[in-house]
Image (tube, grey):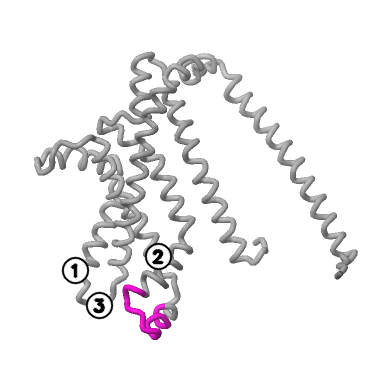
Amino acid sequence: MIVTTVSSIELDRRRFRRRQSGRSVVISLVSTVVLGVLVWLTVINTPGWAAVQQAFFDPAVAWKFLPSVLLGLWLNIRILFFAAIGVAVFATLLAIIRTLRGAVFFPVRFLATAYTDLFRGTPLIIVLYLVGFGIPALGLFPRLPPEVWGTVALILTYSAYVAEVLRAGMEAVHPSQRLAARSLGLTHAQTLRLIVLPQAVRKVTPALMNDFVSMQKDVGLVSVLGAIDAVRAAQIGEADTYNFTPYIVAGLLFVIISWPAIRFTDWLTARAQRREQIGGTV
């Protein structure tokens, strides 16, 4: 049986950390109370707060339209699911094309670069209008629901952002990794699939999660095409009651579905920081 003893210096360090932790908790509680008082003095205690509360935070209106907004939110979740898959596939292809070397690949590299520049600079709502109203007007496709075109617009826009994030991760992989893989007999495709892409994704996972969180919010913009999602259901409720509370309900529901991804992103960022700093704090 091995008995381990802790030195007095280490015990002093532990006591100091406990004191610091307790002090931090007290300071956090005090600052929270002070912030709450300031919010009450600057917002709730204002002369127009009663009118704002009735127009935006009416519990009866919120309860009345909660079922319809929830039903619309289910459409947003389905659009997000298929858009995330489409973005993952298309963005990976774009990133691979942009990292191809050799003069023979210049045309496809140029097209991929032009695509990412175009869609990163174009607002999503304009892409929604162009795709949702422009493409059906061509008459090349059968009549499709607006949520389908909204999903296509999301894929086109966010693939440009995600492709650049993936390309940055792929270029951050040290060239020696590629050379070692090729010296072992792996083809270029095998090197990308087995060596480069896994390391690249690991390096840029927090950035990819941030893009995913942004897409979760922007899914609500498909309402401009006429899809009855959470935002459009809230708009219908507002037109029926002349009250903005349904919008608050929709916004809170979007926060709820985004919160797990936000917390997971923060956890990944903190873990990556701990690995880089080896437990230290800058």
List x then y, in percent, for residue 131. Answer: 21, 42
Q: In this view, does 8 lie above or below 178?
A: above
List x then y, in percent, for residue 103. Answer: 22, 77
Label 1: how many Cα within 10 Å (few below 14, some 14–19, many 20+): few
As for residue 73 lying within the magenta part, the answer is no
Residue 220 relative to residue 204: left or right: left
- Residue reaching furthest to the left: 139
Query: Which secondary structure type mostly characterizes the magenta part of the structure?
Result: helix
Specify the quadrant of the image occupied by residue 68: top left
The residue beneath circle 2 is 168
List x then y, in percent, for residue 226. Answer: 26, 30
Whether the residues at callouts 2 and 3 have beta carbons within 8 Å, the answer is no
Specify the quadrant of the image occupied by residue 225: top left
Q: Is residue 193 above or below residue 179?
A: above
Q: Is mark 3 on a helix, strand or loop?
A: loop
Of the residues shown, which amino acid type is indicated by label 1?
Pro
Of the residues shown, which amino acid type is indicated by label 2?
Ala
The residue beneath circle 1 is 107
Q: Earlier in the sequence, mark 2 or mark 3?
A: 3
The residue beneath circle 3 is 102
The alpha-carbon separation of the residues under discs 2 and 1 comes to 21 Å
Of the residues shown, which amino acid type is indicated by label 3?
Gly
Quadrant (top left/top right/bottom left/bottom right) for the N terminus:
bottom right
List x then y, in percent, for residue 39. Answer: 61, 28
Q: Which of marks 3 and 1 is nearer the N terminus?
A: 3
Q: Earlier in the sequence, mark 2 or mark 1?
A: 1
Q: Is residue 156 above or below residue 149?
A: below
Whether the residues at callouts 2 and 1 have beta carbons within 8 Å, the answer is no
Q: Is residue 184 above or below residue 163?
A: below
- Boundaries of the magenta span: 178-190
Residue 222 relative to residue 181: left or right: left
